[in-house]
Image (cartoon, rainbow, N blue to C red):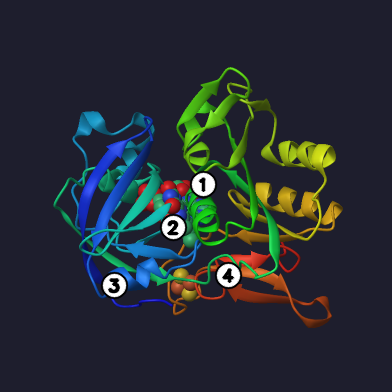
Amino acid sequence: MSGKRPFSATVFKNRALRARIWRLDVDVEPPQAQTFLAAIPGQFMEVRLSDLSLPRGTEIPEDLRDAARRQIILRRPFSPCDIRKTTKGARLGVLYQIRGPGTLRMSTLGAGDPLSLIGPLGNGFDVPADLRRALLVTGGMGAPPIEYLAEYLKTRRPDVDVRAFAGAKGLEELPYEVRFDNEKGAILDEFRRLNVESCIATDDGSVGFHGFVTDCLHHWLERNSPGEGRCIVYACGPERMLAATATVAQAWGLECQVSMERMMACGIGLCQSCVVPVRGDGGTAVNKLCCKDGPVFDSKDVIFE
Ligand SMILES: Cc1cc2nc3c(=O)[nH]c(=O)nc-3n(C[C@H](O)[C@H](O)[C@H](O)COP(=O)(O)OP(=O)(O)OC[C@H]3O[C@@H](n4cnc5c(N)ncnc54)[C@H](O)[C@@H]3O)c2cc1C
Ligand code: FES
């Protein structure tokens, strides 16, 4: 289900979790609330940020000062990290990283502000009826749709065993609350609350496993094996990490769904700016659109950069 007309949501809360990682919660009223409550993890929305003001000069990080001045015309895509029913409709959680002029503006939103959205858009992750185990893999800001998928599976598919593997460059880039447990070491609070076992990997070793999240996944599979029944690897993050995840999944004979990231101008299949090359019939490359045919693809089909 998708909604392609802009509508106005209302900011409930907007706060910094780390220096560059923020969480925005917005309230959506009916009829769009119902559409979002029926959304599939991995679907996204296009957010209009062009009419918002920039933070005060001193609050703009040095490395973003030039980018901050850039005019922004196009909406920006974000995948909700959770969608909850409220008495008046639905509340969407958006976990975002401040990266440029749009997200800098987003950080100035306050409770009660209106925000123009279009969505939910795209296809989302496929959760087949015979799924028995889901291995969720995230890298950096690939976290939001994976967090929502974990919650979705725990609430709607309690028959599925869910494990999460989260990677980042270091602790500061990890878009989660990290908790230290005497027995298990560093664990992710968002997954603990859902009763999902999680494993953290950081490139610099500042927390959890020292190395890539895909190595963490591979070691876990060596120790545990995928087990009986259908097991799918679901991944979202930088393209190199998605390619590495696909390689691990293939080595274990597992299906793998990857949520791809592309710059998106229209978000609804009109501008052709978000091409993802995939293998067509006979192995020839065919261009698919990330916003319309994706953002989730079967990793076997994707021709990674
Ligand atoms: C389907 C989808 C879902 C997304 N969900 C989230 C989310 O939940 N949270 C979040 O923080 N971000 C998410 N993103 C990325 C987010 O859209 C960008 O970070 C945002 O548009 C940056 O806007 P900006 O104006 O602040 O920075 P810009 O100036 O637009 O970008 C800053 C830098 O980031 C790079 N960049 C920006 N967007 C992309 C992209 N899509 N692919 C590759 N490189 C990019 C640019 O090349 C530039 O160097 C998602 C992207 C897609 C396609
Ligand atoms: S963003 Fe315009 S076609 Fe995909």
Q: How many numbered circles are shown?
A: 4
User: Of all residues shown, which one is farthest toward the left?
Assistant: 112
Q: Residues within 10 Å of mark 4 (few under 14, many from 20)?
A: some
Q: Amino acid at mark 4?
A: Val
Q: Secondary structure at mark 2?
A: loop
Q: Amino acid at mark 2?
A: Ser
Q: Amino acid at mark 3?
A: Gln
Which of pointers 2 and 4 indicates the residue nearer the eye?
2
**Which of the marked residues, 3 or 2, is nearer the chain's N terminus?**
3
What is the C-alpha distance between the residues marked 2 and 4? 18 Å
Say whether residue 120 is left or right of residue 184.
left
The answer to whether residue 69 is seen in the rendering is no
Q: Amino acid at mark 1?
A: Ala
The residue pinned by badge 4 equals 275
Q: Earlier in the sequence, mark 2 or mark 4?
A: 2
Return the residue nearer the eye: 304 or 163.
Answer: 163
User: Could you tell me how far apart the alpha carbons at marks 3 and 2 are, in whole angstroms?
Assistant: 16 Å
Where does label 2 land, which residue? Answer: 79
CA distance for labels 3 and 1? 24 Å
Q: Nearer the viewer, mark 4 or mark 1?
A: 1
Label 2 vs 1, first from the N-terminus: 2
Label 4 to label 1: alpha-carbon separation:
22 Å
